[in-house]
Image: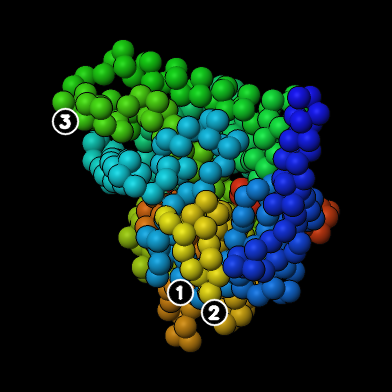
Amino acid sequence: MEVFSLLLLISFILYLFWRTGRRSKQFPPGPRPLPLIGNLLQFDMRNPLKDFDKLAQKYGPIFSLHMGGTLFVFVHGFPLVKEVLVTRGTEFAGRPQNPVIEVITKRKGIISVPYGQVWKEQRRFSLMVLRNFGLGKRSVEERILDEATVLMQSFEENMREPFDPFCFIDNAVTNIISNFLFGKRFGYDDHSLRNILDLVHQNMKLAAGLWAQLYNAVPLVRGLPLPHQTILNNAVKVMAFFSKELEEHKATLVSGEHRDYIDAYLEEMQKPENKGSSFEEEGLFIILSDLFIAGSETTSSTLLWALLYMMTFPEVQEKCQAELDAVLGNNSDIKYEDRDKLPYTNAVIHEIQRFANVVPLGVAHAPIKDMQLWGYTIPKEASVITNLISVHRDQSQWKYPYEFNPSNFLNEKGEFVKSEAFLAFSAGPRGCLGVSLARMELFLFFTSILRKFKLVWPDGSKVPDLTASYGITLSPPAFKMAIKCRRQT
Ligand code: HEM
């Protein structure tokens, strides 16, 4: 009997080796996978973006990799990415399984929820609350401008020496989303928020790294005390932070008076028609985490890149400042609607996003059933990765694909021109839920900073390092900047 069991075990292992060490011709082409781990160790997981480009050059705009038993399909370039996100957006609006993330989210919330009724309900509700955000005493615009004033004051207090703007920008941006979610802001020296943000940033790196991929690809390693456990431990601490906010809200909720997202959601949960629906407390937890994480690091990294590029390309900075001065004069407050009168500045903000590629690979999609794409079969359980950088570098779409050049968004008359190939927020049914808020934040923070300060590299500082640190987001390296006041107020 023991011999029989042993033979059975060996046959099973051999079967696994055989199954995971071959690729089907129906799937998009790609390198031969190794048994069990697939293509996992065949590229540099510290930053695989260059490897993905090389694979696209070798196999074409659609290729596939195996991570353990899971098929990853990569789509490159504007036409194919547009097909997945927009033209056939609903067919590819699913989310693949991602075991390490699922331990945390249990496929609830918004970002990792599969396509279907629950996702529609939760997305629609969150969009509705986001639209009404600021209908109360202060508009969203005023709240952002209030925060920008505090940010300017902090810059001014620190300007005697070159300083690292990271914490100030990170906290300012997080205060906007936390105002929306919890109805409050945190002081820039508040350690409770800093600690949480540090955990979130660490997880954004780890979740795209080797250990997370290993956890997903090889179930046997999941219980082992390896670095992937950090992701789970960090998530527990972040959830405890939300739990405190939630308990405080439950204790002080006044029916019909929504201070913020949590209040609106708690009221929605209590509606008789929502009994047994997807509006429940665990889901709320995950949405808080989704919106907090998606709404903070993305926007703060974009603004940090903005500061870096303005110091690196001083002529662009000066042109923005000249336009802002000419259109707004010295005294008037800036408003979001001024964007239409500021084509150059608007083009610069778009170019910062195009060039920085803060979410380089978007969020993985999945077909809602087995699908054909470019003549290949894409099974329902595959991860479809839309390479947004490849769209932002697509030579058929941009005048200067590899240069930082605001002319990418300007016509000969100097007017701002939109481009369908601008996909910093992705597009289609699963496109960024916070795009309107993020655009307003980027515009108001960026213009407030440039109107008030001239940004320069500190004397004697080294050649700027523009190498991004890879994770789910591409964040800039730590840097110091020197600032000079351009105007009072
Ligand atoms: C999804 C980019 C700010 C909430 C996404 C996606 C991208 C993105 C590329 C993936 C879409 C896809 O699956 O194809 C950005 C950038 C931002 C930003 C570059 C800032 C500069 C925000 C903000 C919020 C937010 C402020 C919250 C208020 C979300 C959510 C999703 C998402 C909830 C998932 C949507 C879904 O699965 O239906 N974002 N985002 N984002 N974003 Fe943003």
Residue at disc 2, secondary structure: loop
1 or 3: tag closer to the N-terminus:
3
The residue lying toward the viewer, choosing from 471 and 11, is: 11
Q: Is residue 404 left or right of residue 128?
A: right
Contact between marks 1 and 3 (CB within 8 A): the answer is no
| Image coords of residue 235 (percent x, y) | 57, 28
Q: Is residue 479 left or right of residue 383?
A: right
| Image coords of residue 477 (percent x, y) | 72, 48
Q: Residue at x 83, y 55 (%)?
A: 462
Residue at label 3?
273
Residue at label 2?
397
| Disc 3 crowd, CA 10 A, few/some/many (<14, 14-19, 20+) | few
Q: Residue at x 72, y 45 (%)?
A: 16
Identified by mark 1, the residue type is Ser
| Disc 2 crowd, CA 10 A, few/some/many (<14, 14-19, 20+) | some
The numbered dot on residue 276 is none
Residue at disc 1, secondary structure: loop
Contact between marks 2 and 1 (CB within 8 A): the answer is yes
Mark-to-mark CA distance, 1 and 3 = 43 Å
Identified by mark 2, the residue type is Gln
Q: Count how many numbered circles sit on residues in the image.
A: 3
Q: Is residue 485 left or right of residue 86?
A: right
Residue at disc 3, secondary structure: helix
Residue at label 1?
419
2 or 1: tag closer to the N-terminus:
2
Mark-to-mark CA distance, 2 and 3 = 48 Å
Identified by mark 3, the residue type is Glu
